[in-house]
Amino acid sequence: MVVWSIRNKAGCSSPVKYKHLDPLFGLDLFIKKIKHTKTGNLRALNEEIFATYGKTVHTLFFGTNHWMTMDSRNIQFVAATEVDKFGNEPINRKACGPLLGDGVFTVDGTSWKRSRDIINPIFSRSQVSQLSLLEVHFKRFLNHIPRDRSTIDLQPLTQMLFLDSSTEFIFGKSAGSLSPSES
């Protein structure tokens, strides 16, 4: 109901509906996504869906309405003005919480608003355009990944990457957790 009122308020048309083989639960698309994820090719499936249906697609996920979009205007509209109507906590917190903790990608409501207010100044145009700062930290991150195909836990490394890049953005100096000699 919320989506339709926002659609009408914004003067948008309804997104195209994905043609599910299972029109009640959408399990066909879910199974496709699992198969593509296992082969490391989920992006190709998403590209195929967008090429077939357009930039915004209405799908089903276990009988629940879901929308996929690659339209930056839709993403900006939801993230900037209507985020309180599009929760992500129930799904994202369980899946991403162990890696990202409680923050803008995993919580809703006042917790989300507080997290967004904290990180919002970080993403000013001048700072976001300096991707070379992130590249330095990402190269250090990659140097910690063994090349012998052994299994490693990426969570601590990802947290260090986030810490180093975030402190560089916020304070102008990295915490240096990925390169202890510089910390």
Image (cartoon, grey):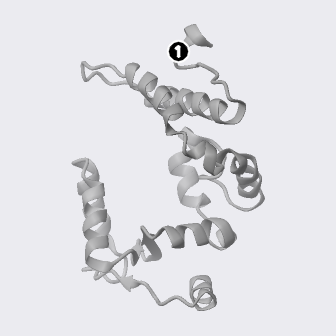
Relative horizontal placement of residue 22, taking residue 171 as reference (left or right): left
| Residue 34 visible in the picture | no
Q: Which percent across, then down, holds residue 4?
A: 57, 88
Relative horizontal placement of residue 32, taking residue 158 as reference (left or right): left
Q: Which percent across, then down, holds residue 116?
A: 71, 53
Relative horizontal placement of residue 47, taking residue 61 as reference (left or right): left
Name the quarter where the C terminus is drawn: top right
- Dot 1 surroundings within 10 Å: few (below 14), some, or many (20 or more)? some
Q: Which percent across, then down, holds residue 95?
A: 50, 49
Which residue sits at x=59%, y=52%? 105
Which residue sits at x=46%, y=88%? 14
In this rendering, is residue 166 above or below 178? below
What element does badge 1 sit on? loop
Q: Quadrant of residue 25?
A: bottom left
Name the quarter where the N terminus is drawn: bottom right
| Residue 171 visible in the picture | yes
In this rendering, is residue 129 above or below 24? above
In this rendering, is residue 88 above or below 130? below
Which residue sits at x=38%, y=74%? 55
Residue nearest the observer in this picture, 131 or 95: 131
Kindly give the residue lying farthest to the top in the view shown.
181
In this rendering, is residue 108 above or below 118? below
Q: Which percent across, then down, holds residue 101?
A: 62, 41
* Image label count: 1
Residue nearest the observer in this picture, 22 or 170: 170
Which residue sits at x=58%, y=41%? 100
The amino acid type of the residue labelled 1 equals Ser
Give the residue pinned by disc 1: 179
